[in-house]
Image (spheres, rainbow, N blue to C red):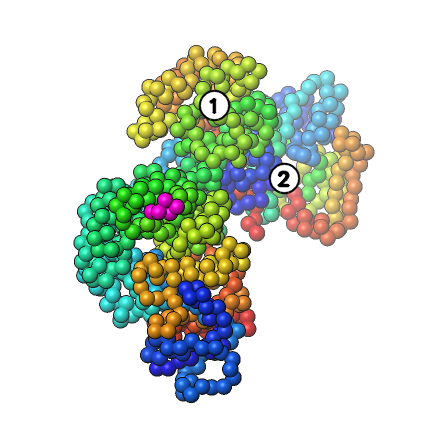
Amino acid sequence: MKIIIQGGRVLDPATGLNEPADILIEEGRIVDIRKSGSGQTRPDEIGLQRIDAAGKLVFPGLIDLHTHVREPGFEYKETIRTATEAAAAGGFTTICAMPNSLPVNDNQSVTRFILNRAKAEGLVQVLPIGAITKSSKGEELAEIEELKEAGCVAITDDGNPVAKSSMMRLAMEYAKTFGLPVIDHCEDPLLSEGGVMNEGVVSTEMGLPGIPPASEEVMVSRNLILAQETGARLHLAHISTAGSVHLIREAKARGVKVTAETCPHYFSLTEEAVRGYNTNAKMNPPLRTQKDLEAIRAGLSDGTIDIIATDHAPHAREEKEREFSNAPFGIVGLETALCLTLMLVEDGILTLEQAISKLTIEPAKFLGIKKGQIKVGMDADLVVFDPAEWWVVDPAEFRSKSRNTPFAGWKLKGRVLMTLVKGVPVFTRTPTSLEKREA
Amino acid sequence: MLKRKDLLAITELAPDEITTILDTAVSFKEVMARDIKKVPTLRGKTVINLFVEPSTRTRTSFELAAKRLSADLVNVSTSTSSLTKGESLLDMAKNLEAMRADLIVLRHPVAGAPHLLARALQCGIINAGDGAHEHPSQALLDLFTIRERKKTLSGLRVLLVGDILHSRVARSDLHALRKMGAEVTLVGPATMIPRGIEPWDVQVAYNFDEALGKENQKPDVIIMLRLQLERQEKGFIPSLREYSRLYGLTMARLRRASPDVLVMHPGPINRGIEISPDVADGLSSVILDQVTNGVAVRMALLYLLMGGKTE
Amino acid sequence: MAHEIVERNKGTDDLILIGIRTGGVHLVHRLANKIKEIEKVSVPIGELDITLYRDDLMLKKEQPVLKKTVIAFDISDKKIILVDDVLYTGRTIRAALDGLMDLGRPRMIQVAVLIDRGHRELPIRAEYVGKNLPTTSDEVIKVLLEEEGEEDRVVIYPPSPASQEGQRVKT
């Protein structure tokens, strides 16, 4: 199948490309990137399916390092199919499936199951991440080599931290053998015990038990020290505090092999969003203070934080419509991440290239996959994006099965018009019902 | 006037609303002094006590308040309710509303539970204690008791002593006292004083004796908080003995304060731990008055929240 | 009226005057003073707030403010003169009767009002009436007193849009 995407401004942070260009795609690969606007149809452009991107941006399909697809085991919250539909709507062409399914992805049969489901039902590429320990209980190592063999691209016990330092050290050394990065959800469970939101002025006023920033920072510190000692590849998931950013910055300066990610909610919201006992603002790590938000932004700006991931965590309505302490942690994020990230460009925190790179080439480099770039010979995973269109976040329009977002009603700028995976459009924007009504 | 459907937190009340409630309670205290302690005012209204966290005092107080206003009251407590069978709080409450309950009094171990119901239901919700967040009617009856004895609230010096961190009574009390212009000092070990209290505009003292005996700054009111005996297990205090030695109100300590100081306690009392029996039963103690006033204040709340047309 | 009350009750034994808030309060004090002038005896006075006994509480938009009931003695077996400024539908007196019954068992209750404006909705009557004043139900009557800083007088206001709303729940 031959396709040409014409007239768009092609933005590829990896190569520095930022100009109007046409992209020629054949058999799912990019075969040429050529100057557009010549007005004449070249011989090899005849008979192609045309996608008109005039006035729009074209950039590499986004890669999410942190998605909870919920399958197997929690299909009532989300399935691989609906998660990939949400991903495609958000401009993501690759998502990494976190292992805290039921059963936990701690062995090759679950890994293969996920890959098979993704092949059968998934709209975008799904890369499994395996567990560090059996059932993520933090007691015994999982069969890590087997997980890698089956297709896992990293290991983590996310949902849970690896509480025992001795276990984390063993895991890092063992994973090093196979070149697998270790991702940690940094939380000291004894410090955070019982906590349901950030510990501070707001939690004190609301009478809710708090999760102190120290809980994250203590583990960030521990992990950095162990990573330095073992020489393993460490990745820190969903960083949320100023103290963590400071520790990471300092460790990187010392040469520790660490990458760090944060999520859009940590640079867009603070603990104030929880007021009124809003369970749609409840996640772990929790939303922190304004100071932390600013430090996260600064960390993104100076490269301390390499990657932006969603931590997309769907939950059913009846689960969130509960007393605050009884509601599960987590919010969805695939369909709002890109536009929230672009708000950083509006605010002058990042350039457009930097913003896109944290969602494309940086995760690709981390995973060691040939994605996240617009280059001849690479898979045509692309997003066609209208940078000017404003829209209002309406959870009822989400492709995800779940609606748990704190961003309902937010006005965001920029819309994904089309997402292509290997040259195949897996998402095309049709006007939403709201827009139809307004039109 | 109380132009509201619910009473969820003292932080939501304006000082003049608090005054209205206290003034109304005066009339109801007079009703309680009669032989026939009943008025027909809320006849035909239905109040449900939904106590997901058990309580004898508060539940009985609300029950008497409702019955003395001739309202019908039904008690629903966890052990006998469908909540144990996995029904959600929201579903349970909607069922009660469907039975045409006019008002639900909710006590729940999780902060914010009354807010969850108030958002979803048409009928009024009174928060009878939600986790560590607030216990508004307790604070109101405490204010009533203080005002009755001291004639004013503004400018009074009040000590709140004990496990502030876990106490919803402490939170409601200090918010109510600050709103009415009283000065509040929190007294307790550092492990039991919460973080993030700067917006509260209160003092903190770790030394009880000092706080009691400060020349020209002696407290007018001492509110002792109940120590939950599990706190020692969790390490907030090393032992009950040490806590009692440092923060228990004994006669000797009481003498450091001025002779007309009021001693208060929300109950139930741990005799000998946070308060010695002779102080609890002594002349400075208004603990039983608090209980009497509690019914009057709750009658006032029911009257003010349930009367009138809901627009 | 003071003379009538004393005459009908053959003296002041076991007599109690109770004024209904707020219209009857000043009047009950005046009556008590007059009786004192005549009989040289101080008759006990009480003030009764009937808000809790009203039959129209659920119809009003807001809860009326409660005022205090001050009856510092036992009313059982006493002869009570209930005093109010205006007798209209009779509902206030009905509420006052219920309130008194909850306080004790009086031997007898009689009603004394300054103005009877007619339009009874319940079988209630006053034994002692200062003046009968026929009115239409959309007029408003106000009794103004010296004790409140006004000249002693009774004013009849013509119907007004606001008063018509109030009419339906007037006492």
> What residue do we see at 50% from left, 39% from top?
B9
Q: Is residue A253 found inside the magenta-colored segment of the image?
A: yes
Q: Nearer the viewer, residue A125 or B10?
A: A125
- The answer to whether one can see residue A127 in this image is yes
In the rendered image, residue B98, in percent from the top left (x then y), is placed at: 42, 53
> What residue do we see at 67% from left, 34% from top?
C22
**Please, which residue is most extreme toward the right here?**
C151
Q: Quadrant of residue B218?
A: top right
Q: Is residue C165 left or right of residue C102?
A: right
> What residue do we see at 23% from left, 67% from top?
A116
Q: Would you name the residue on which mark 1 appears? A: B205
- For the N terminus of chain B, the image quarter is top right
Under mark 1, the amino acid is Ala
Q: Nearer the viewer, residue B80 or C19?
A: B80
Q: Is residue A133 left or right of residue B36?
A: left
Q: Would you name the residue on which mark 2 appears? A: C92
Under mark 2, the amino acid is Thr
Magenta: main secondary structure equals loop
* Label 2 to label 1: alpha-carbon separation: 55 Å
In the rendered image, residue A189, in percent from the top left (x then y), is placed at: 31, 41
